Amino acid sequence: MSGFLSVIKERFKEGFVTNNPTFIQFIGMCPTLATTTSAKNALGMGLAVTAVLAFSNTVISLLRKIIPSQVRIAAFIVIISGAVTATELLMKAFLPALNAALGIFIPLIVVNCIILARAEAFASKNKVFPSFVDGIAMGLGFTGALFLIGSVREIIGAGTWFGMKVTPEAYSPATIFIMAPGAFFTLGVLVAITNKIKYDVNERKRKKEANAALALADRAEKPSEEETV
Amino acid sequence: MKKHPLPDSTAEFDKMLTVSPNPHIRSRETTPSLMLCVIIALLPAAVWGVYQFGLRALMIMIVSIVSCVCAEALSALVLKLKFSINDLSAVVTGLLLALNLPVSVPLWMPAVGGVFAIVIVKQLFGGIGKNFLNPALCARVFLFSWAGEMTYFTTPKTALPLFSSDIDAVSTATPLASLNAGALPGIPIIDLFIGKQPGCIGEVSALLLLAGGLFLIIRKVISVRIPLAFIGTVFALTYFFPLGDQDVHYAVASVFSGALFLGAFFMATDYTTSPCTPIGQIIYGVGCGALTVLIRYFGGYPEGVSFAILIMNLFVWFIDKYTKPTPFGHVKPEKPKKPKKAKGGEAE
C-alpha cells in the first residue's frame, strides 16, 4: 500500500512541480496559448487532455510488450486518437457549449506533444498503475497551468472569472489579454516567475552544500593549524 | 591559510569576464547627452501639442513621463538591474508615448502604457540597449486594446477637462481617414504642414517635427538615412499609386498627415532598434515606408506608422547580419590553386 502511495506522491510531484508540462517542459504550447481565453475554456481543455492522457497511458502501458518498437509511434497514435474521438463525442453530447468554444483544439489533442511524450517517455516503459497515475498527474499539472493562465487572462482581459464580473465597475478590461498577444505576455511572465523560484531554490541548495563543504574543510584543517602554532 | 569566499552567484564571475561590445572609440557623447538632445528636439512639437490641444495634453505628458520613470526605478530595484534613471531614456520613452496618444484618452492610459513600455518591453529584456522593440511604440500598440479611446480624435482647440476622463466632445476624422478613402482632406496642405489638424498630441505638426529632426541630424545624433528613406518611400508610393484619381497633392498630404514625421525622425531612428550599417538603415527606412503605405491602404486602422516601425524592428537583426561591411584590408580566402611549375632560376 505504501508503494502505491509513494508512486502517487512521486508522480504528482513530477507533474505539478519538477516536470510541469507547461512551465518546465514547454510541451503542448499550442492549446496552452490558444484555448486559455477564459478560465472555463482552460479548465475544460485541461480536463479533456487529462482524460485522454490517463486512458492512453493505461492502454499503452498494457500493450507495451506487444507493440513492436519499430511501429510504436503509429500504434500510440491509433490508441490516442481512439481516446480523443471518444472524448470529443462525449463532450459533444454532454458539454456542447464548451465543445463549441474549444472547437478544433479538441481533435487536435491527438497531436498534442504531452500525450505522445508521456507515452514514449513513461507509459511504454512502466507498469500499468504508475502509468495511469502519471497520466492523471501530468494531465492535472497541465490543467493547473492552463487554469492559471486562463484565469489571469480572463480577469485582466475581460474583467470576469468563470463569466462572473470580479473587477470594479471603473476597470476597463484590456482586451489584448484575451487575444493572442495576451497569451504570450501571460505565459512569459508566469514562466519568468517559475524560473525565478526554481533559481532561488537551486541557489539556496548550492550555498548550503558549499557551506557544508567549507565546514568540512575547516574541520579537516584545524589539526594542521595547531601543529604550526 | 586564507580561504577564498565562494561568489554569491555566477553573475559575479560573469561580470569579471565581460568586455563591453564594440565600438571602443571614446566620445564625449553619453547616453544622457544624446537623450537630452532628443528631448530638446521633441520640445517644439510637444509645446505645439499643448498649444493646439490644451493643458490636458501637458497632463498626459506628465503622467506618461512620471509613470515611465517610476516604472524604471521600481523594475530596476526588483530585477536588480543597473539603476538607470539618470540616463533620461525613460523620460524620452514617456514623452514619445504621450506624443503618440490622442488628447482625449483617460489619464490612466498613459500610466498603464508607461509601465508596459518600461517593464515588459525594455527592462524584462535586460534594460536600455537590449530591447528589440521600440518601447514607446510597443506601448502605444498595446494601448490599442482600448481601441475606442485610442481612435477618438477631437478637433484642435476643443476645451477638454484637465483630469476627468468624461470627454464630452465630438469625435472627428483625421485627414488620414479621407486620404484612405481616396479623397484629399478638407484641410489645406499648408495647415497640415504647420499642424492645424486633428491627431495625436505630438504628431500633428510636420514643420516642428522636421525642425527637431534637423537639429538631431546636425548634432549627428541621428543620420539622415532612415528618415529620408522612410518619408521618401511613403511619398513615392503615394505619388505613383494614389488611391482614387489623385495628383501630387495626394502624396504631399499623405506625407504631412498622421505620425509619419514623428515616426521617421524620432522612433524609427532609435539606436537599439534600428540597423547600424548605412545600407541596412536605407533598407530599413524603405521597409518602414512601404509597410506604412500598405497598412494605410489595406489595413484595419487608418494609420500604419507604428505598426510598420515595429514590424521592421523585428528585421533589424536580419538586416544587420546581411549588410555587415567587410573589414578594412579583408582579403577573401583564396581557393587553393594548383601549384604551377616553377620556372627554372627565375625566383633566385
Image (cartoon, rainbow, N blue to C red):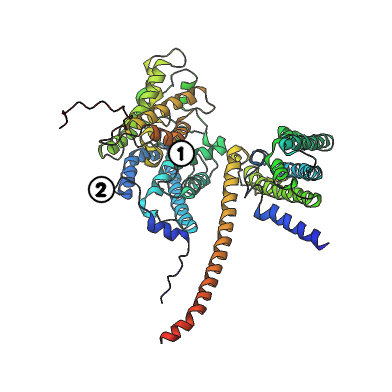
Name the residue type under label 1.
Leu
Left or right, B232 with respect to A150, comes to: left
Name the image quarter holding residue B61. Answer: top left
Residue beneath label 2, please?
A: B27
Nearer-the-camera pick, A53 or B178: A53
Name the residue type under label 2.
Ser
Looking at the image, is A131 positioned above or below residue B192? below
Regarding residue B117, the answer to whether it shows in the image is yes
CA gap between label 2 and label 1 equals: 29 Å
Residue beneath label 1, please?
A: B137
Residue at x 26%, y 26% (from the top left corner): B340
Q: Chain of mark 2?
A: B
On the same chain: label 2 and label 1? yes
Q: Which class describes the residues within 10 Å of circle 1: few (<14), some (14-19), or many (20+)? A: many
Name the image quarter holding residue A31. Answer: top right
Q: Chain of mark 1?
A: B
